[in-house]
Image (cartoon, helix red, strand yellow):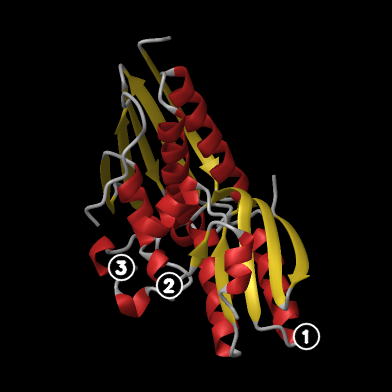
């Protein structure tokens, strides 16, 4: 397997881009020897981030793009996803696990991303938009899901 | 694979057999929503969503399950879940939706739970 690989793409703001990013990350993770559970978790975390970028960040605007990059180094996979939207305050997102929010139909994406990878950061990006950084290291066997939410 | 939906009746309980992916953009959300509305419109109130053949579900899909639950509850109905794969169980755990849904591992138990 290759020691390191990286891919950078400027993706259109449409659902096809979500599917493409998910497939790319899953393919690289497979190539890098990640377990099936890890690959599933990475795919889902990327999907959640890309959906946010395409729908909430860029609002499906054809003139805005999602800047996607993924890098594998040794047993680690690092993903960056940046939209060109107005940005938002991650601290202002209601806790979807609070009793008063459990029956809401949306608002679980950030929670899932955080639970499914080892490192998760979200915040404002330069020159605009929101950037999400996802990092996952190859695990030995069955993948753990973080329970510290 | 996009979402497949099949509906059948067992002892007065409506079983909705779901298969494939429940995600944003797979036209799945509309399909599930329409199915629940149709079931409720004909007066059925006891609904079991059989997720045994669901291979993938994202936060939008979880939202659809919650919407099904609340839509039914608002009309005096109840939605329960059957045959959750480990991946889906994990998601219910992370999101604490396991506190909302009654879940069952076999259909007979799910049907009996309504009696």
Chain of residue at mark 3: A
Q: Which mark is residue A93?
A: 3
Q: Do callouts 3 and 1 mark residues in contact (Cβ within 8 Å)? A: no
Name above or below for residue A28 compared with residue B36.
above
Measured in 3D between alpha carbons, the distance from the residue under mark 2 to the one under mark 1, in whole angstroms, is 25 Å
For the residue carrying disc 1, how many other residues have a C-alpha within 10 Å: few (<14), some (14-19), or many (20+)? Answer: few
Left or right: where A132 falls relative to A61: left
Measured in 3D between alpha carbons, the distance from the residue under mark 2 to the one under mark 3, in whole angstroms, is 21 Å
Q: Do callouts 2 and 3 mark residues in contact (Cβ within 8 Å)? A: no
Residue B112 picture location, percent across and down: 60, 72
Out of A106 and B40, give the one closest to the viewer: B40
Out of A145 and B16, give the one closest to the viewer: B16
Measured in 3D between alpha carbons, the distance from the residue under mark 3 to the one under mark 1, in whole angstroms, is 38 Å
Name above or below for residue A116 compared with residue A136.
below
> Quick one: label 2 or label 1, which is nearer the N terminus?
1
Residue B63 picture location, percent across and down: 51, 66
Left or right: where B16 falls relative to A137: right
Q: Which mark is residue B42?
A: 1
Residue B88 picture location, percent across and down: 49, 52
Q: Which mark is residue B100?
A: 2
Q: Which mark is residue B115?
A: none
Residue ID at (35%, 44%): A116
For the residue carrying disc 3, how many other residues have a C-alpha within 10 Å: few (<14), some (14-19), or many (20+)? Answer: few
Residue ID at (53%, 40%): A11
- Mark 2 vs mark 1: tell me if same chain: yes
The quadrant where residue B71 appears:
bottom right
Which element type, helix, strand or loop, lies under badge 1?
A: loop
Q: Is residue A85 visible?
A: no
Which element type, helix, strand or loop, lies under badge 3?
A: loop
Quarter of the C terminus of chain A within the rendering: bottom left
């Amino acid at each position: 397997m290759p020691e390191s690989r990286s891919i950078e793409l400027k993706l259109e703001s449409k659902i096809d881009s979500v599917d493409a990013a998910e497939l790319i990350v899953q393919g690289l993770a497979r190539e890098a020897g990640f377990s099936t559970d890890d690959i599933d978790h990475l795919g889902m975390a990327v999907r959640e981030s890309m959906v946010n970028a395409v729908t909430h960040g860029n609002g499906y605007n054809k003139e805005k793009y999602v800047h996607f990059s993924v890098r594998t180094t040794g047993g680690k996979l690092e993903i960056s996803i940046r939209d060109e939207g107005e940005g938002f305050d991650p601290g202002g997102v209601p806790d979807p696990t609070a009793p008063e929010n459990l029956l809401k139909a949306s608002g679980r994406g950030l929670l899932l991303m955080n639970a499914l990878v080892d490192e998760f950061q979200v915040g404002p990006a330069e020159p605009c938009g929101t950037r999400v950084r996802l990092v996952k290291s190859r695990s030995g066997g069955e993948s753990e899901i973080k329970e510290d939410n | 694979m996009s979402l497949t939906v099949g509906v059948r009746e067992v002892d007065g309980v409506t079983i909705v057999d779901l298969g494939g992916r429940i995600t944003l953009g797979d036209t799945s959300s509309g399909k599930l929503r329409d199915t629940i509305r149709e079931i409720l419109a004909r007066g059925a109130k006891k609904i079991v969503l059989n997720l045994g053949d669901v291979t993938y579900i994202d936060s939008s899909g979880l939202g659809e399950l919650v919407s099904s639950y609340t839509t039914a509850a608002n009309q005096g109905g109840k939605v329960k879940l059957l045959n959750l794969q480990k991946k889906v169980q994990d998601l219910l755990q992370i999101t604490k939706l396991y506190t909302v849904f009654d879940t069952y591992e076999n259909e007979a138990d799910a049907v009996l739970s309504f009696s």
